[in-house]
Image (cartoon, helix red, strand yellow):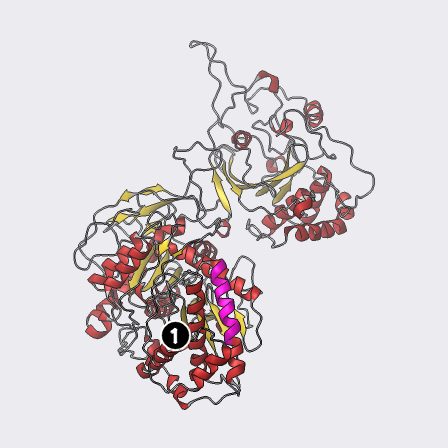
Amino acid sequence: MGKAKNRSFPSRSYPRSATPGFILGPKSAIDTSARAGGRLHVDGARVFELCDLFAPGTRDLPIPLSDVAIQSKRAVCVEVLRTFKGKNFQLSGGNPHRDSRSPDWRIHGYPMLCIIGGASKVFPKDQGEWRAVQCVFGALLTQQIRARGIGIEVVSREGFGSVFPTLADLPDGIRLDPGLLPPGAGAAAIAAALTVTDQFITEMRKLKVPESIGTLNGYTSAALEAVDRLMAVLHDHALTTPLANASTYATAVSRYTGRAAECALPAVKATIAYELPGMLPIARGPKKKLRPEPEEDSGYGSESDYEDEDEPAPKKKSGKSDGDEEVATREGFTVKKISVLSGMAALRMATFYGMHYSKALFNAKGSMKDSGLTGTQLLNAWAPYFELDHDPIYQGIVSKDGVRLLVMDGAPNPINITGDAIPKQNQLGAVVIDTTNNTSSEKAEYLAFFQALLASAPDSKKPGGLLFMVESASKHPTGGDLVHGVMRVCGTRVSVRAFFTNFLKNHLEIMSSTTSAYGLTVLDDNETLARRAMLTNRLVMRNGDLFRTGGTASPVGSEPGVSKPGGVELVGSKPGGAEDAPAVPRPSTDLPLLALRNRGKVRRVALRPLVAPAPIDGSKKKEVPSASAEGREEPDVASLKKQFAALGSFEAPPLVAPNLEAPGYYYEEDDIYNLQRYLLRNQANVAVLPGVSRPQWLQMGPAAYTTGVHPAITTNTQIIIQPLNRGGNHWALLYITLGAPDPLGGRHARLLYLDPLHPNDVPVEDLRLLQLPFPGIEIEHCDIPYQDDNDGPLLKGQDSCGAWVVHLAVHLASNGHVLPPASPNRRTAALLLRHDHNADIAAARVLDLPVAPVDRRLHVVEPRGGPVLRRRASFGSLPALASSGLQGGKKKPPSSEY
């Protein structure tokens, strides 16, 4: 990443909700409580100073700086937890939360450090005393980071944002936002400051706590000013006491009278640099000039003239947007955002209107009125922000019929996590996720995962469920209160349009009629320009970043600089168009082919089409033989299979069941074949085929996947599983899904290619041959390295590819084509797989081999009208792959192997 130079600022402002106000619902009064989400407007000049601070090295980032900051903060927290050992408080943060639900429903790490003391009868026992601890820690950490040249000070309250390390309250504790401290030196500075702070608490228990510490209690302006005064006193103590330690800090606090100290920290000339390998993906979206905007403007900053511009866009007229435009995929999935003045406003709006949208979706007039869920009432919440009043909002709804809502935090504060795991629910009207502390790729993961839980309208032209992803202002990783609140509304195009038309438009009209509440909720012109500057300088994410995470510049096996077909495409808004009007696409990265929950784990593979051989002369074109031509003589299938099996050089299977746990044992072809058949024996829609070598693969023809060649394949087959031998000593996996038959007898196929050891080593040219039996096949490959064959410096091979090929095939077929998560210890996981497989291998070996059905109407024949391969004469004319009856041992690598 680039480097950001430290600068001094003439002042810091702490925007606070002195006069909050917010309205939920057409008949509601203005809510003036702290939880309402109103916040005073801030000086837009501060944002431009912030952008200028990060301008070097950030404007061309392919991902927003907020992504880098989140990963950096987590790395700091994890390292502090690893190195610090104390006795007066516990630490939490950084690490992902392990939950008892599906492993695909990930709870990501909180990017802040929580210092948790718990209830106590001795110092510190209340908020004021914990704030005294907070000030001591802030002064100590300031000295540590200045000594290391990695920062200038620790902010005692939330304010200018999370650029500086920032302290805040927790019940019986402290929360530290590490700011933009580099992970290594930053963690060392924090651990050193915590060590002295822990000792300070011990020393303070020996002294009398002065009455002035009581003035630090509460959230009044006087209490917050008292915190700032104590912080100044302790900064002065650090500067004037060269040998300051825990005991001297305890003495200084015990003598605190409530008066401020004149303290001016000297300037520090230093540079903050980050080294986070693997953080930045290669993908970058193209520039595109969009259509002109409609004259009507919502004031929420959701449309744009330009996208992904590298230079600041032209100045906009009063009321225009911030430049974060609506985006959509080719399939019509749409993301549209609104920006409001605070995160609590956005979070409460998403919760309130999500409930009402769900109610409207399932009631007598909604598109889900016949779903059988009209009368249901469901509100699940998991670790939401503690000030969110979702229960009172829910109870305030007069008729709750049809409310089906989930509210959760994607990277929650550990103090909000309860021991109760919520059950998974489908057919939800709305899902609200606080994604403030999630990276773009994590948000994209949630976008893919939770789509499966939303209600889908039976008619694609009618609304279905919606996902709301909310970012809270004051907790944002790079801008703090200056970033504002964001609510991204995600769903089908017609669903998003229905929500904005029927709910948000009405809300804006209500707010605009109440000047005070409107002004505290909607961005003014200056703030809109300020937010545009933050987007331009890549401090915060755009909607389009959801579709550009983890991609590559070009598909595997493709030539650089050439556009490739078949990918998911982002599209700009079509202002003034019909509700379900198709949008004009533009290229971007891919959505998964088989399961949306695989987003971020797979990449699309572009295939060049197969072409017919050129004719010998212009007057006589040689006809291409067709395996399905009428009147053709039936080939000697038995003879062809015998020749075909010889190409694999198989050995005879052993007479007794092998010990799969024996050191160095390599899964043979029959081990994999028998285990896959045995473990999937109850799934009639799955056809398990024997492994195939490359010489066999090169004999691919249109009849390769027919019942005549593989009796396991019938018209009821929806999944085909086949191991592919590579190099004679390694196994990959072909996982093929089949759609409904077309009028010509063919079925649209999709392939997921998996190599557990070398996921990016994809034999693209050989996979092209699948266009013969499956014209129009689409292919993606798994990007996860499940296998680890290196044992530290010994580099001892584990030979676990066969075990992983068995496991991946069974997991995919049994879990809706969803890839399993990678194990944190892949070698141990492989040993467990071998142990489980060893218990089944004996029974698997005696399982009957598949037999073709007697009813020939269930037989699959080769497709008609497919592509023709330009072949060499030496390849022969074998029509198909090996029969299901072919089994064997370890293949010997022919010279033409991979």
Which type of secondary structure does the marked residue at label 1 adopt? helix
Q: Where are the magenta residues, as a range?
A: 184-197
Residue 848 drawn above or below residue 276: above
In the image shown, does 790 or 146 lie closer to the viewer?
Answer: 146
Q: Quadrant of residue 801?
A: top right
Q: Name the chief secondary structure element in magenta.
A: helix
Q: In the drawing, does residue 790 fall left or right of residue 523? A: right
In the image shown, does 202 or 275 lie closer to the viewer?
Answer: 202
Q: Position of residue 892 (x, y in %)?
A: 71, 30
Q: Position of residue 475 (x, y in %)?
A: 38, 67
Q: Quadrant of residue 510?
A: bottom left
Q: Was residue 537 drawn as part of the magenta stretch in this picture?
A: no
Q: Give me the residue at 48% from left, 73% from top.
A: 416
Which residue of the protein is positioned furthest toward the right in this rendering? 655
Q: Position of residue 815 (x, y in %)?
A: 58, 52
Q: Amino acid at mark 1?
A: His
In the image shown, does 375 or 480 lie closer to the viewer?
Answer: 480
Q: In the drawing, does residue 352 fall left or right of residue 510? A: right
Residue 419 drawn above or below residue 669: below
Q: Was residue 192 drawn as part of the magenta stretch in this picture?
A: yes
Q: Position of residue 720 (x, y in %)?
A: 60, 40
Q: For mark 1, what is the residue?
A: 235
Q: Report the quarter where the C terminus lies.
A: top right
Q: Give me the residue at 54% from left, 64% from top.
A: 97
The local crowd at label 1, few if under 14, some if 14 to 19, many if 20 or more residues have their Cα within 10 Å, is many
